């Protein structure tokens, strides 16, 4: 039980001290963790446990995508914010369909999008470790400028 407290404390500390760019990367990673857990739910024999595992984890993944979408700075000039907004909408739709139909294929489609965005974001962070796409950060939100 002591190890759980230590792990939770470490996780909370890493979130509190992370740069905004690193927080976005953590959200992508959280999404991938929950979608993988939802996917494992399809292997569950017990129907109740299966549906619960799929539903709960897809909802957590949807919450993360909603947070990513709401953190976009739509006042940034260019097409990037609008494109990302539409991609997040697509991902949300796929996750909803996966949950309603209890099919894994829409999760695969959503994961492709998120994985590509995560790779691009990680690459941006290696080139710009402070987590700002163009050196612009307003009120704690991520501003993406092309």
Image: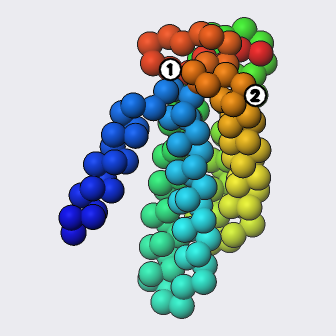
Which disc, if any, is residue 141? 1
Report x, y in % for residue 123: 73, 34
Q: For mark 2, what is the residue?
A: 83
Q: Judge from the rendering whether residue 32 lies leftward or rightward of residue 90; answer left or right.
A: left
Q: Judge from the rendering whether residue 124 lies leftward or rightward of residue 132; answer left or right.
A: right
Nearer to us in this view, 105 or 123: 123
Label 2: element kind:
helix
Residue found at x 57% / y 49%: 29
Residue 64, placed above or below residue 135: below
Among the 4 quarters of the image, the one containing residue 139: top left
Q: Would you say residue 90 is visible in this rendering?
A: no
The C terminus, quarter of image = top right
Mark 1, other Cα within 10 Å: few <14 / some 14–19 / many ≥20 = some
Residue 9, placed above or below residue 145: below
Report x, y in % for residue 108: 74, 61
Residue that extends furthest to the bottom in the rendered view of this protein: 45
Q: In whole angstroms, how far apart are the C-alphas of marks 2 and 1?
A: 18 Å
Among the 4 quarters of the image, the one containing residue 84: top right
The N terminus, quarter of image = bottom left
Report x, y in % for residue 91: 67, 47
Report x, y in % for residue 137: 54, 12
Check contact, mark 2 vs mark 1: CB within 8 A. no
Residue found at x 47% / y 54%: 60
Q: Judge from the rendering whether residue 67 lies leftward or rightward of residue 74; answer left or right.
A: left
Which disc, if any, is residue 23? none
Residue 64, placed above or below residue 59: above
Among the 4 quarters of the image, the one containing residue 117: top right
Residue found at x 60% / y 55%: 32
Nearer to us in this view, 54 or 33: 33
Q: Would you say residue 18 is visible in this rendering?
A: yes
Comes first in the chain, label 2 or label 1: 2
Residue that extends furthest to the left in the rendered view of this protein: 2
């Amino acid at each position: 039980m002591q190890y759980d407290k230590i792990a939770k404390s470490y996780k909370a500390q890493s979130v509190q001290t992370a740069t905004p760019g690193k927080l976005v990367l953590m959200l992508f990673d959280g999404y991938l963790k929950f979608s993988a857990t939802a996917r494992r739910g399809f292997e569950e024999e017990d129907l109740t446990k299966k549906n619960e595992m799929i539903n709960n984890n897809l909802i957590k993944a949807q919450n993360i995508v909603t947070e990513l979408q709401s953190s976009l700075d739509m006042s940034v000039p260019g097409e990037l914010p609008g494109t990302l907004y539409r991609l997040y909408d697509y991902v949300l739709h796929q996750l909803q369909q996966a949950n309603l139909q209890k099919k894994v294929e829409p999760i695969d489609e959503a994961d492709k999008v998120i994985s590509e965005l995560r790779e691009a974001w990680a690459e941006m962070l290696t080139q710009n470790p402070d987590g700002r796409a163009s050196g612009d950060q307003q009120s704690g939100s991520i501003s993406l400028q092309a």
